[in-house]
């Protein structure tokens, strides 16, 4: 599918979940990783697209970027 859509999708999903008040950062990471793995498995079985580790790596980089931005309070200036 592409690295950029997976990167942006994971980043936006993390940011969206950040607005739910009772979720911790760990639970947001777990839910995002679960979504990424589920989507890759779904693409593999239903669309016969080969498993691509770079898509998961792009999502992990997006999660790490989100983690850094929330830990350093950079996102607090925007939201």
Image (spheres, rainbow, N blue to C red):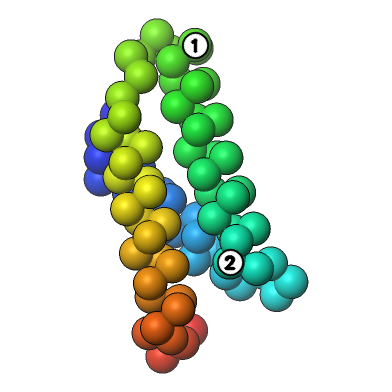
Find residue 72 and report its horizontal and vertical position in percent. Answer: 40, 83
Q: In this rendering, is residue 57 above or below 20?
A: above
Nearest the viewer among 77 and 68 is: 68
Mark closest to the chain's N terminus, 2 or 1 = 2
User: If the image is split into quadrants, where does the N terminus sit?
Assistant: top left
Q: Residue furthest bottom?
A: 77
Q: Residues within 10 Å of mark 1 (few under 14, many from 20)?
A: few
Is 7 situated left or right of 45 in this image? Answer: left
SS class, disc 1: helix
Find residue 12 and report its horizontal and vertical position in percent. Answer: 44, 58
SS class, disc 2: helix
Tell me, for residue 72, which label it has, or none: none
Q: Residues within 10 Å of mark 2 (few under 14, many from 20)?
A: some
Q: Which residue is mark 2?
A: 25
Find residue 41 and report its horizontal and vertical position in percent. Answer: 50, 22
Give the number of the mark in front: 2 or 1: 2
Residue drawn where x is 50% and y is 12% of the image: 46
Q: Which residue is mark 1?
A: 45
Q: In this rendering, is residue 43 above or below 45?
A: below
Residue drawn where x is 41% and y is 57% of the image: 63
Q: Residue furthest right?
A: 22
Find residue 58 and report its horizontal and vertical position in percent. Answer: 30, 45
Q: CA distance from mark 2 to mark 1?
A: 30 Å
Residue drawn where x is 40% and y is 9% of the image: 48
Residue drawn where x is 65% and y is 68% of the image: 24
Total numbered circles: 2
Q: In this rendering, is residue 40 above or below 66?
A: above
**Which quadrant holds residue 66?**
bottom left
Q: In this rendering, is residue 10 above or below 73?
A: above
Residues at marks 2 and 1 touching, judged by CB atoms closer than 8 Å: no
């Amino acid at each position: 599918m592409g690295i950029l859509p997976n990167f942006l999708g994971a980043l936006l999903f993390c940011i969206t979940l950040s607005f739910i008040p009772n979720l911790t950062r760990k639970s947001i990471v777990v839910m995002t990783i679960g979504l990424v793995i589920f989507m890759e498995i779904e693409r593999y079985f239903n669309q016969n697209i080969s498993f691509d580790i770079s898509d998961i790596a792009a999502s992990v980089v997006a999660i790490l970027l989100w983690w850094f931005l929330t830990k350093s309070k950079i996102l607090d200036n925007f939201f």
